[in-house]
Amino acid sequence: MAKKKIGYIELRWTCPKCGTVNPGPVKLCTGCGAGQPVDVKFEQANRQELITDEAAKAKAQAGADIHCPYCGTRNPADAKVCVQCGGDLVEGIKREQGRVLGAFTTGPATMVKCPRCGTENPDTSLVCSQCGGSLKLAEVEAKVPLSTPAVPRKTPAWVYAAIGAVVILVCGVIGYLIFLSQRTEAIVGTVEQVSWERSIPIEALVPVEYSTWQDQIPQGAQVGSCEDQVRTVQDDPAPNAVEVCGTPYTVDTGQGYGEVVQDCEYQVYDLMCMYTVEEWSQVDAITMSGNNFSPTWPEAALQPDQRMGQERSESYTIVFRSGDVNYNYTTSDFNLFQQAQVGSEWTLNVNSFGNLISIDH
């Protein structure tokens, strides 16, 4: 998907020494003066606001900061030497970037109580306007749910055991039935009678309705109604396309700012139309049957707009008798049918359910 840039926000980082929450671009802790560590993890505030200051935007677009390999000081992405010790930054460690921090959340400001003095401050503030204390603790408390959700009860082990036993039993029964259906017994049967049936479809030109894209309608077709539908989905804008974007989210840019982006795609619409063409389709069938060994194909008096179809069908039934039981065997093999003369003996392969599976002569 294509990424759509919305803007930039200021991130935060927590000092590992004193716990003070600092603005992302600030390199030294505002609480204890400690430098920002190399492995610091930037995070979003509960509610974010897009940066409007052009200078801050330029910093956000500059790239990830570089940590000096000698003194550890954080330097801008375009710096050649360390601002603290003057060391060469060729071997400097570039800050991690590209990490997704979460969904971009904006809206009306809410107030957060200072955990030390109780003064209410906007939720975008890092320190209390009254006492200067960190508001990080207040944010954590605000996120704690009022009630703990009930822990789902565990299913007793015997329930799983019972389900497993039932599954094994069912599989066993199915396997046994399959075994019985494939197991056959050879018996001798005598041909008692035969029958046959042959059929030819009758076709005529009839109107048939289809749907396709407007530019793919065949010539001579009668066009019906059309409606806009999504034909393709692509990453780039196009004529007659609708932009569809997901939830905005923030990506760490590596210098204390986050880039807010959306994953977008473009649904290209086109006309999907109904159309009608005339096609040869079966409208009737003629059938002939008999009880002899001279099957013939039926003949029909066709109308001027009709023709005989190509999908002819033939079916031959042989009735065998073995003891007091009759077995029917149906085939489309004309040569096999011709061999099954009345009174001839055949080997019948019958399964455990009494069904005739195959015959041998």
Image: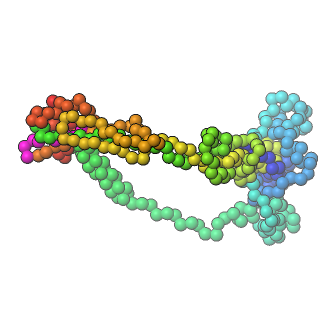
Residue at 61% x, 69% y is: 147
Q: Position of residue 14 (x, y in %)?
A: 77, 52
Q: Please state, as top left, top right, bottom left or bottom right, where the N terminus lies in the image.
A: top right
Residue 110 higher or lower than 357, as above or below: below
Residue at the left extreme, as displayed: 323
In the displayed structure image, the side of residue 99 where residue 153 appears, left or right: left
Colour setup of the view: rainbow
Residue 296 can be seen in this image: yes
Please check the rendered image and state whether residue 10 is part of the magenta-colored stretch, yes or no. no
Magenta part of the protein: which range? Answer: 316-324
Pick the front one: 64 or 335 = 335
Residue 266 higher or lower than 312, as above or below: below
In the displayed structure image, the side of residue 342 where residue 113 appears, left or right: right
Q: Please state, as top left, top right, bottom left or bottom right, where the C terminus lies in the image.
A: top left
Give the main secondary structure, helix, strand or loop, of the magenta stretch.
Answer: strand
Residue at 68% x, 51% y is: 228
Please check the rendered image and state whether residue 321 is part of the magenta-colored stretch, yes or no. yes
Residue 71 can be seen in this image: no
Q: Position of residue 8 (x, y in %)?
A: 82, 49
Residue 34 higher or lower than 358, as above or below: below
